[in-house]
């Protein structure tokens, strides 16, 4: 078959993911689909995958995608005639500690919310379901009856056949040598057999995904690592319906494989491979088995399943898998190149993810937007530095093992740290900061109180599902902000300068709120999509007639700048520049912040002269500072924007003057807890592109009557007007536990009676309110008023136990909003 000269879409890579994307595009009615495989279908990593199909993931939408895969594979054989070997024989995970059992109990509660059957299992239950195990140290487990396993090669071949049946063309032995691009858009691919012009190209190149990304000038941060399993000799009496067994505390899993055990490992420290690139001729290849590396896991496996002591190993296997810096795969349009899409980096869960990921990306391509919130896996969460070879090698040593590690709340990465530091970093370290990492930034998450730990011992996390070792430290910080004064280093928050004679018109197009305000005005606003969903949650400060400053979260820097640039109309006199690193930001917050700041500034800081929601340049000691009177904790305060080279001087002056006011350094954990008490939203948790701005209770920040910009009405206006007419079917509600002991994190089910009506989108301990607080969306019937909706008797399911909560549409702390404006 001759290679076509043009296509509607070219897919690079013939593994299970590439075949799934082709299959789903064909299902959606697209023709002129071309899939190119450099060697043979499945020859990269698909062919040696273990084929485990799990459904329960870390969030609702990731679970939705995994469930979709399982449902798809159930019917795929009947549709295509290709035997997939899919069977839902269930999975059992053992817990060897009470902490792991707590994790499972929370997972089981979450599963019920997400529609996945999952049950806690006693030690006796575990023994009955998996009679081959030694129950020594086992304290229980979790049973997911509809999990299963499949033949990975035939899953891919079935998807490929389905794609061909829909008109897709699949070519083997055709490697891509270049990505064609022009004017910031992809225009096709170059191969040894010729050029195929295409307006859309999809990178499903697996192990070669980073290399293909570099061809396109796009960052695709993934790194191959060795991945081990062994297959035993036949075991008499081994049932074909034996569940998949996972023992995460021993880094091992087991599955039945043609009457034998397949024993796989997720060792704590992995071995990266292919640091200088994956060989172009790598095909159905294996890597040498490092027995010294694999044996510690295998020895534990033999103790856990004693029959292995008398069973020989027929096959030792080591093959590469690709891993990302955060163990979540990469999906979506690359920010560097229009219409260059990615589905890669599946972290050894490619088979269970492929069906859902292929469906989601196909809908993204066809409809121009993801079908629902996919921020968990959106490639725009990645920073350019994460694509450096040294970073990827170092981080991958950790990430493979983290798949089976305890998934404690607030767990921090240990490797590839110290890359981005604020100008205040060293002083904060001296003050006892325990740093966490976000988007490469080292940020103080909490500060060790001097009376709690010797100065010679650096502050460090002791992880738990209960009150961690920093709980009392956070309490002190929290109460300082509420009762006195504290400061936060917010230098990591992303900052964009938008300027030009059309800047106001561009921002009026993008922003739901009215940003055409007086110079110095600060506007809280959302950027909406055409469905009224929230693409960004941020502030806009007008610095002059033609210059604005946007401040958004550190994690959303790439995403938000990409969204903004894509919405600057062609020919507009407007440029957007990332200026994040140009200024340090000190947030001085609390009822005594005005007193303290007045010690260093002769400027009038009264509410009459300096009202809430405005920015002015003031003197702080010897330094001119742009002070923004705004808050993310719900208190009187200012965010002080200081040129990077002067930021440390301003902090030192504040620390000296602050001794008389009890000034406390405060970390990100307290910032989060305070904003939850006050009911401020967090993008990615409480508001996403799937959440309508009115459902989120943010109608006050939407101005449908504002004068349109010269480029038209703001994006999403029609969706807002429709929702106003139709009414909301769900609303975000604030919750506070009546019992002061349990801890909320996220994803805990919200119940009315025995019915699940929603889940907690984010939670933390509210030290001022004296118990855990959170937010979550609750379904609303057409007959219910908002008062009736919030007035129901709600419970929260935490690890299988129900706890009564207070519910309110208004913030639980300072509902009249008097404190920030005092």
Image (tube, rainbow, N blue to C red):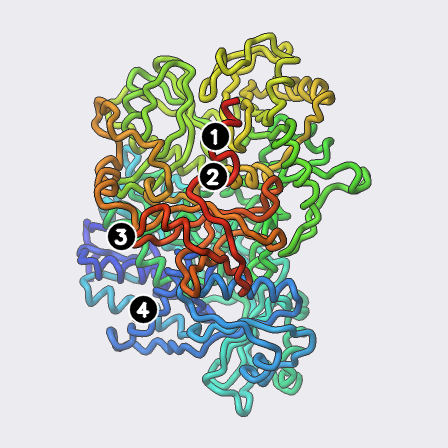
The residue furthest bottom is 236
Q: Are marks 1 and 2 in contact (CB under 8 Å)?
A: yes
Callout 4 environment at 10 Å: few (<14), some (14 to 19), or many (20+)? some
- The residue closer to the viewer here, 555 or 617, is 617
Residue linked to disc 2: 811
Residue 139 occupies which quadrant of the picture?
bottom right
Residue 669 in percent (x, y) is at: 60, 41
Residue sitting at x 30%, y 58%: 359
Q: Is residue 385 above or below residue 794?
A: above
**Mark nearer the N terminus (2 vs 4):** 4
Residue linked to disc 4: 72
Q: Are marks 4 and 3 in contact (CB under 8 Å)?
A: no
**Mark nearer the N terminus (1 vs 2):** 2
SS at mark 4 in the image: helix
Q: Is residue 223 something that shows in the picture? A: no
Residue 483 in percent (x, y) is at: 64, 30
Q: Are marks 3 and 1 in contact (CB under 8 Å)?
A: no
Spatial CA distance of label 2 from label 3 is 24 Å
Spatial CA distance of label 4 from label 3 is 34 Å
Q: Is residue 4 above or below residue 450?
A: below
Residue linked to disc 1: 817
């Amino acid at each position: 078959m001759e290679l076509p000269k043009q296509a509607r879409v070219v897919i690079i890579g013939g593994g299970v993911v590439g075949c799934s994307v082709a299959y789903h595009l064909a299902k959606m009615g697209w023709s002129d689909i071309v899939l190119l495989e450099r060697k043979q279908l499945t020859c990269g990593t698909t062919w040696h995958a273990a084929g485990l199909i799990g459904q329960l993931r870390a969030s609702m939408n990731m679970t939705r995608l995994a469930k979709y895969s399982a449902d798809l594979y159930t019917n795929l054989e009947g549709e295509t005639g290709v035997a997939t070997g899919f069977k839902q024989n269930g999975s059992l995970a053992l817990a060897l500690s009470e902490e792991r059992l707590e994790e499972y109990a929370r997972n089981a509660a979450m599963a019920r919310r997400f529609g996945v059957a999952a049950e806690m299992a006693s030690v006796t239950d575990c023994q009955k379901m998996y009679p081959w195990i030694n129950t020594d140290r086992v304290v229980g487990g979790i049973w997911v009856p509809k999990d299963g396993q499949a033949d990975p090669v035939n899953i891919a071949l079935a998807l490929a056949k389905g794609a061909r049946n829909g008109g897709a063309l699949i070519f083997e032995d055709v490697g891509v040598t270049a990505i064609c691009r022009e004017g910031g858009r992809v225009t096709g691919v170059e191969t040894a057999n010729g050029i195929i012009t295409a307006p859309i190209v999809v990178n499903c190149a697996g192990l070669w995904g980073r290399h293909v990304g570099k061809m396109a000038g796009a960052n695709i941060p993934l790194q191959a690592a060795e991945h081990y399993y062994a297959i035993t000799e036949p075991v008499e009496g081994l049932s074909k319906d034996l569940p998949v067994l996972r023992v995460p505390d021993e880094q091992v899993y087991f599955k039945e494989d043609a009457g034998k055990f397949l024993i796989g490992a997720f060792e704590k420290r992995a071995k990266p491979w292919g640091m200088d690139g994956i060989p172009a001729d790598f095909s159905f290849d294996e890597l040498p088995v490092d027995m010294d590396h694999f044996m510690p896991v295998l020895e534990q496996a033999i103790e856990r399943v004693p029959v292995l002591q008398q069973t020989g190993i027929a096959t030792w296997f080591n093959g590469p898998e690709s891993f990302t810096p955060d163990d979540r795969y990469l999906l979506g349009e690359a920010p560097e190149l229009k219409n260059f899409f990615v589905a890669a980096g599946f972290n050894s869960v490619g088979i269970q993810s492929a069906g859902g990921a292929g469906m989601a990306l196909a809908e993204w391509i066809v409809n121009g937007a993801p079908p629902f919130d996919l921020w968990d896996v959106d490639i725009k969460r990645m920073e350019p530095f994460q694509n450096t070879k040294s970073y990827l090698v170092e981080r991958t040593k950790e990430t493979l093992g983290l798949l089976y590690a305890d998934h404690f709340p607030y767990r921090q990465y240990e490797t590839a740290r110290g890359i981005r530091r604020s100008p205040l970093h060293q002083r904060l370290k001296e003050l006892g900061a325990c740093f966490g990492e976000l988007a490469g930034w080292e940020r103080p998450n909490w500060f060790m109180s001097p009376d709690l730990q010797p100065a010679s011992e650096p502050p460090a996390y002791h992880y738990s599902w209960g009150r961690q070792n920093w709980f009392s430290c956070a309490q002190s910080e929290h109460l300082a902000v509420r009762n006195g004064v504290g400061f936060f280093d917010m230098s990591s928050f992303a900052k964009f300068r938008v300027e030009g004679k059309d800047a106001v018109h561009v921002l009026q197009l993008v922003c739901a709120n009215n940003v055409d305000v007086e110079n110095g005005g600060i506007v809280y606003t959302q950027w909406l999509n055409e469905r009224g969903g929230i693409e960004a949650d941020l502030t806009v400060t007008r610095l002059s007639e033609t210059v604005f400053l946007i401040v958004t979260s550190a994690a959303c820097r790439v995403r938000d700048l990409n969204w903004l640039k894509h919405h600057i109309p062609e020919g507009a006199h407007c440029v957007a520049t990332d200026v994040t690193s140009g200024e340090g930001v000190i947030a001085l917050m609390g009822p005594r912040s005005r007193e303290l700041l007045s010690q260093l500034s002769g400027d009038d800081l009264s509410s009459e002269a300096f009202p809430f929601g405005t920015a002015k340049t003031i003197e702080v000691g010897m330094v001119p500072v742009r002070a923004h009177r705004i808050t993310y904790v719900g208190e009187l305060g200012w965010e002080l924007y200081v040129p990077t080279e002067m930021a440390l001087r301003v902090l030192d002056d504040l620390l000296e003057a602050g001794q008389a006011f009890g000034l406390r350094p405060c970390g990100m954990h307290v910032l989060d807890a305070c904003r939850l008490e006050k009911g401020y939203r967090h993008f990615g948790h409480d508001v996403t592109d799937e959440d309508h701005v009115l459902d989120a209770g943010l109608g006050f920040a939407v101005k449908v009557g504002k004068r349109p910009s010269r480029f038209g009405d703001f994006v999403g206006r029609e969706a807002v007007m429709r929702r106003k007419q139709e009414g909301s079917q769900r609303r975000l509600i604030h919750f506070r536990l009546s019992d002061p002991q349990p801890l909320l994190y996220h994803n805990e089910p919200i119940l009315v009676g025995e019915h699940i009506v929603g889940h907690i989108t984010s939670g933390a301990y509210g030290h001022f309110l004296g118990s855990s607080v959170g937010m979550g969306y609750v379904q609303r019937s057409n007959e219910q008023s908002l008062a009736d909706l919030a007035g129901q008797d709600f419970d929260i399911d935490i690890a299988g136990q129900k706890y009564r909560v207070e519910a309110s549409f208004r913030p639980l702390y300072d509902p009249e909003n008097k404190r920030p404006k005092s």
